[in-house]
Image: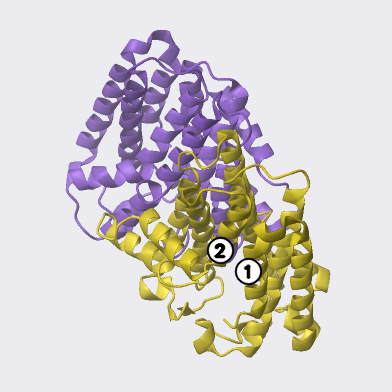
Chain colours: A purple, B yellow
Amino acid sequence: MALVQARVERALERALPAADHAPQRLHRALRYAVLGGGKRVRPMLAFAAGELAGAAPERLDAAACAVELVHAYSLVHDDLPCMDDDVLRRGKPTVHVEFDEATALLAGDALQSLAFEALAAGGLADDPAVQVEMLRMLAVASGTRGMAGGQAIDLAAVGASLTLPELEFMHILKTGALIRTAVALGARCGKPLARGEPDRLDRYAKCVGLAFQVVDDVLDAEAPTATLGKTAGKDAARGKPTYVSLLGVARAKALAQELRGEAHAALAGFGGRAARLGDLADFIVTREF
Amino acid sequence: MALVQARVERALERALPAADHAPQRLHRALRYAVLGGGKRVRPMLAFAAGELAGAAPERLDAAACAVELVHAYSLVHDDLPCMDDDVLRRGKPTVHVEFDEATALLAGDALQSLAFEALAAGGLADDPAVQVEMLRMLAVASGTRGMAGGQAIDLAAVGASLTLPELEFMHILKTGALIRTAVALGARCGKPLARGEPDRLDRYAKCVGLAFQVVDDVLDAEAPTATLGKTAGKDAARGKPTYVSLLGVARAKALAQELRGEAHAALAGFGGRAARLGDLADFIVTREF
C-alpha cells in the first residue's frame, strides 16, 4: 500500500501544473489541495482492481489520478463557507483559508477539469471506445447521479431526520459512486474480465464504498481531530444524520464488519488475483483516520 | 441561426436531468442555469464548423451541448458572491439568488460533469480515439490553461493595470480557449479536414474569440442593462482592465472590425462550406447584446 501511495503521489505531482507557471496562485492552490496528504483510498482501489485485470501500472497512474483529483476537488468545494465551512483538512488549513474563497472555487473547478484531462491521456485502454466509456463513467459518478447529487441531498438533510434507506441512498451517491468508479476504471485499464466478473467486482465496490462511509461516521464521532486531520464531531454539531446518529456506535461498527464480510464474499471467485482488494476492504474498515 | 438555436435548446433540454428526479432542487437549478436564455454562440460555432466538415447534426448536438454546459457552469460560478457577486444574468436573478449559494456551487460543479458526459456519448466520431482527443481538448480548455486560468488572472487584475498583451493573454484563456474548442469539436464530428485546414479554422476561431471579448467590453460600457440581460457598466465599476479602458471605445470598435476581417481572411480557402462561420463572425462583431 505504501508503494502504491508513493507511486500515486508522484503521478499526481506530474499531472498537476507547475507552481511557477501562470496563473501561479491558482496552480499553487491546486497543488496545495492535492499533494502531501490524504489516504489515497480511491487510487489504491484503482490499482488493486487493475492488478486483478493485469493492467499496466502506467495506465493505472492515470485512472488513479483521475479519481483522486475528483475527490480532491470535492473536498475543496465542500469546505467552502457556503457548504460545510470548515477550516481544517488533512491537518492543514483548508484551501479557502490558506488562499481565499475565489481561488478555492476556481481550484476546485480546475481540479475537476484536470481529472478528465488525466483520464483522456492517450492509450489508457486497448480499445479507445473503452476509454470513452471510462470517461463517461467518471462524468456520471461526479454529477447529479453521483457525487454532486449526494452532496445536494446531504445539504438538504442537515437538521432533518432520514430513514436508514434514505441515508444509504445519499451515501451511495455521495461517496459510493466515485469509489465504484475507481474500481471499475482500474479494471478497465486491463484485460477484459470474464463473464460475471465485472458484476462481482462492482458488488465488492458497493460494499467497501458503504463501509467507508459507515466508518467515517464512527470516526467523526469517536476519533480526535488531531488523528483525523479534519474537525472531529462535526456531524453531530451540525445535526447531520449519520450511521451513528441512526444506529449508535456499536451497531454502526457491526454494520461496517458485515459489509467487510460481504466485500470479501464478492471476491471469493477471483482467488489470489483479488488479494489486494481484500486487504483494502480490511484497511477501510479497520482504519483509525 | 434561429434554427440551430432552437435545435440546441432541445438538445440541452434532453441532456439535462428532469426537474422531478431526485435531487430535485439541484436539478431545477441546473435547468434554470442553462435553459431559456443565452446567445448560444459556442453551439452555433460548433454547428457551423461541423457543417464545414460534413458532420451529422446528431453528433453536433452533443458537441454543442458540451461547450454550452461548460460555459453555463462558468457563469453560475462567476456570479457567486466570492467572484463577481452579480444578481442578474440573462435577464433573470442569478442561480445563487434564485436558489442559494451552496446549490449554485453544486449546480456549477454538476454542469461541468454533465458537459463531459455529453461529449462522451457513444459514437461522436468515426474513430473513438478522436473522441478521446475531443474530451481531452474540452478538459484543457476548461482548466488552468483555459477558462479557469483566465478567470484567475481576471480576478487578480481587478484594480490593477494590465498592458494590452497581458489583457489579450487573459482573454485567450478566459473566453478564447472554449470558443476555439467549440469550433474544433464541431469540425472533429465530421470528416477529416485536408492538410492545413484545421490550422486555418483555428486561426478563424482565435480571431472570433478575441473579437467576442472586445465587443463584450464595448457593450458593457455602452449598452443598457435591459438589453444586455446582465448588469451593465460592471467592469468600470469594479476597476477591471478592459479593451475599452485600455483603448477607448472607438479604437476597441476598430479592433473588433479588424479581427472580423482577419476571421474572414482565414476562411477564404474554404469557399461556400464556411459561409455560416463567416456569418457568425459578422454576428459576433455586430451584436447588440
Q: Can residue B150 be seen in this snapshot? A: no
The single residue placed furthest to the front in the displayed view is B272
Q: Which mark is residue A183?
A: none
Q: Which residue is mark 2?
A: B44
> Badge 2 local density, few (<14 within 10 Å), some, or many (20+)?
many
The single residue placed furthest to the top in the displayed view is A271
Q: Secondary structure at mark 2?
A: helix
Could you give the CA–CA distance between mark 2 and mark 1, rounded to whole angstroms?
8 Å
Q: Secondary structure at mark 1?
A: helix
Q: Numbered disc 1: what chain?
A: B
Task: State the image coordinates of residue B48 (x, y, percent, origin top left).
Answer: 59, 59
B215 w.r.t. A162: above or below: below
x 30%, y 63%: residue: B25
B283 w.r.t. A284: above or below: below
Q: Nearer the viewer, residue B160 or B77?
A: B77
Q: Which residue is mark 1?
A: B280
Among numbered discs 2 and 1, the one appearing first in the sequence: 2
Task: State the image coordinates of residue B51 (x, y, percent, origin top left).
Answer: 59, 55
Task: State the image coordinates of residue A35 (x, y, percent, origin top left).
Answer: 61, 42
Q: Amino acid at mark 1?
A: Leu
Q: Can residue B242 be seen in this snapshot? A: yes
Badges 2 and 1, same chain = yes
B110 w.r.t. A248: above or below: below
In the rendered view, does B80 fall on the left or right side of A202?
right
> Badge 1 local density, few (<14 within 10 Å), some, or many (20+)?
some
Q: Amino acid at mark 2?
A: Met
Q: Quadrant of residue B246?
A: bottom right
The single residue placed furthest to the left in the displayed view is A163
x 51%, y 78%: residue: B86
Q: Which corner quadrant holds the C terminus of chain A?
A: top left
